[in-house]
């Protein structure tokens, strides 16, 4: 449900596979923001679990929902980190279908399997 997030403020020229080009500094910015969001979500989950524990009343649905949010952020961070490890030329773009980031040379989007090569 967080998939529609837009990582980049300004539209860029379209790379060959469609979608938008992503510069390395934008990746760094995006990564910092995700790391912050992840830390906050983790903190919230810990606080929530603590509150439930001292009341001896667990709302598993709430815990699961928070954990799912963490998992989503973790997956996004993982894909950003993969992209950040790639060549310095910023060889990356976003999927024209779901806006997920992808590395140069990717044939299909790792999120939605949309074909990226013509
Ligand atoms: Zn996609």
Image (cartoon, helix red, strand yellow):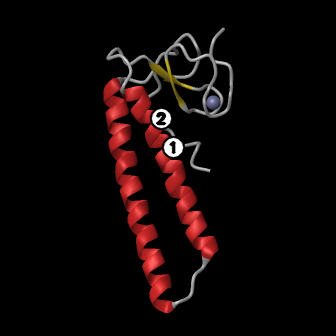
- Report helix, strand or loop for mark 2: helix
Q: Is residue 42 visible?
A: yes
In the image, residue 54 above or below residue 9 = below
In the image, residue 78 above or below residue 44 = above
Residue at the spot 48% in from the left edge and 16% down from the top edge: 13
Q: Position of residue 79 (x, y in %)?
A: 48, 34
* Tag of residue 75: 1
- Report helix, strand or loop for mark 1: helix
Give the camera-side residue of 67 and 37: 67
Please identify the quadrant where the C terminus is shown. top right
- Give the tally of numbered discs: 2
* Tag of residue 79: 2
Q: Position of residue 95 (x, y in %)?
A: 59, 26
Q: Position of residue 51 (x, y in %)?
A: 45, 83
Q: Around disc 2, counting alpha carbons within 10 Å, would you say few (fewer than 14), some (14 to 19), or many (20 or more)?
A: some
Q: Is residue 7 visible?
A: no
Q: Around disc 1, counting alpha carbons within 10 Å, would you say few (fewer than 14), some (14 to 19), or many (20 or more)?
A: few
In the image, residue 18 above or below residue 10 = above
Residue at the spot 32% in from the left edge and 17% down from the top edge: 88
In the image, residue 67 above or below residue 98 = below
Q: Is residue 102 left or right of residue 47?
A: right
Q: Position of residue 39 (x, y in %)?
A: 36, 57
Q: How far apart are the alpha carbons under marks 1 and 2? A: 6 Å
Give the camera-side residue of 25 and 67: 67
Q: Is residue 29 left or right of residue 73?
A: left
* Tag of residue 101: none
Q: Is mark 2 within 8 Å of ligand 1?
A: no
Examine the image and state in which quarter residue 50 appears. Answer: bottom left
Residue at the spot 49% in from the left edge and 91% down from the top edge: 55
Q: Quadrant of ligand 1?
A: top right
Contact between labelled residues 2 and 1, with CB atoms less than 8 Å apart:
yes
């Amino acid at each position: 449900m967080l998939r529609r997030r837009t990582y980049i403020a300004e539209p860029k020229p379209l790379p060959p596979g469609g979608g938008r080009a992503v510069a390395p500094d934008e990746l760094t910015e995006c990564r910092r923001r995700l790391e912050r969001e992840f830390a906050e979500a983790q903190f919230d989950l810990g606080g929530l679990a603590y509150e439930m524990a001292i009341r001896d009343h667990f709302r598993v649905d709430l815990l699961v929902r928070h954990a799912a949010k963490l998992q989503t952020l973790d997956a996004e961070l993982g894909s950003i980190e993969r992209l950040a490890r790639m060549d310095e030329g910023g060889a990356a773009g976003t999927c024209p279908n779901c806006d997920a980031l992808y590395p140069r040379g990717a044939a299909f989007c790792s999120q939605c399997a949309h074909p990226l090569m013509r």
